[in-house]
Amino acid sequence: MENKTKKRILMLIIILAAACIIFTVLFLLLNIKDKFMPNNETNYEAEIIELPDPKYDSETSVEEALLKRRSVRRYSGEPITIPEASQLLWAAQGITDQTKGFRTAPSAGALYPLEVYIVAGNVNGIQDGVYKYEIKEHKLRRILAGDKRRELCDAALSQYSVKDAAAVIVFSAVYERTTVKYGEKGVRYANMEAGHAAQNVYLQAASLDLGTVVIGAFDSEEIKKILNMPEEENPLYLMPVGRK
Ligand SMILES: Cc1cc2nc3c(=O)[nH]c(=O)nc-3n(C[C@H](O)[C@H](O)[C@H](O)COP(=O)(O)O)c2cc1C
């Protein structure tokens, strides 16, 4: 074989070996990152949790729930259950008319600007993380892994109820869904709707004998960052929930 050809083959082998080494190092680095830093991973394709069907009756009358409703900021530290989380989310925005898509709370023009998240930190059977409530399917879609309660608490002026809760329900609004029809008034309407939804959660919590409170004092930009909210969403309320 000619010397020139030999050199070429050698160069080719060296290049292939270098490519293999770079590929292996990159592969290992990515695997290590996945293993040790799962909390910062965003994975929109990740886990879907089928929620149990909501219950449509209970021992608590509406009148009793209204009477018992109170803002509760201290919790026992015991976990809540998936059926409880499911019931609270359904109360917030669940579908109550499958054909027309109407929900538990009223909405101006039935345009439904609200989005609902649950930040799980101590929910039996649910891995800690941030989940979007898929309203039409009554499912949860995990969008972030890891316990985000402390970060949320910091963004809510260090209100301890946020970090001590078993979970935090978060409402946000996409104003454009309503302003497209009602102009600037649509912002007001969407804000009002968060109030309706939050009251539903309060009453459902009273019926389940759970404690909750609406939190309006927080840094919006920080909350958006922590939950990795799309740009068009505006956080409106946090509702920590826990066993009393
Ligand atoms: C718009 C709004 C914002 C609120 N923000 C907070 C808050 O940031 N932190 C908190 O602990 N409670 C907050 N609350 C709850 C009130 O403090 C509570 O409703 C009030 O003290 C009356 O108590 P009750 O809900 O038990 O009747 C808020 C209530 C509303 C309506």
Image (cartoon, rainbow, N blue to C red):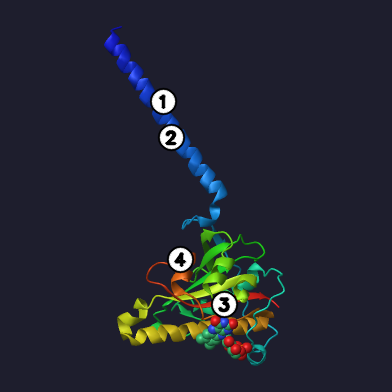
Q: Quadrant of the C terminus?
A: bottom right
**x, y percentage for residue 78?**
71, 70
Mark seen at residue 239? 3
Q: Is residue 114 above or below residue 23?
A: below
Residue 57 seen anywhere in this rendered image of the structure:
no
Q: In this view, does 150 lie above or below 190?
A: above
Question: Mark 2: few, some, or many residues within 10 Å (few <14, many ≥20)?
Answer: few
Q: Which of marks 3 and 2 is nearer the N terminus?
A: 2
Badge 4 amino acid: Lys
Residue 124 seen anywhere in this rendered image of the structure:
yes
Point 50% across, 73% down: residue: 116
Badge 3 amino acid: Met
Measure the alpha-carbon separation of dots 2 and 1. Answer: 10 Å
CB of residue at label 1: within 8 Å of ligand 1? no
Q: Is residue 13 above or below residue 49?
A: above
Point 48% across, 43% down: residue: 30
Q: Write down the residue under mark 4.
A: 225
Measure the alpha-carbon separation of dots 3 and 4. Answer: 18 Å
Point 41% across, 78% down: residue: 113
- Specify the quadrant of the image occupied by residue 129: bottom right
Q: Which element is circle 3 on? A: strand
Q: Which element is circle 4 on? A: helix
Question: Mark 4: few, some, or many residues within 10 Å (few <14, many ≥20)?
Answer: few
Badge 2 amino acid: Phe
- Decide: marks 3, 2 in contact (CB < 8 A)? no
Badge 1 amino acid: Ala
Question: Mark 3: few, some, or many residues within 10 Å (few <14, many ≥20)?
Answer: many
- Decide: marks 1, 3 in contact (CB < 8 A)? no
- Decide: marks 2, 1 in contact (CB < 8 A)? no
Q: Write down the residue under mark 2.
A: 23
Q: Earlier in the sequence, mark 4 or mark 2?
A: 2
Q: Write down the residue under mark 1.
A: 17
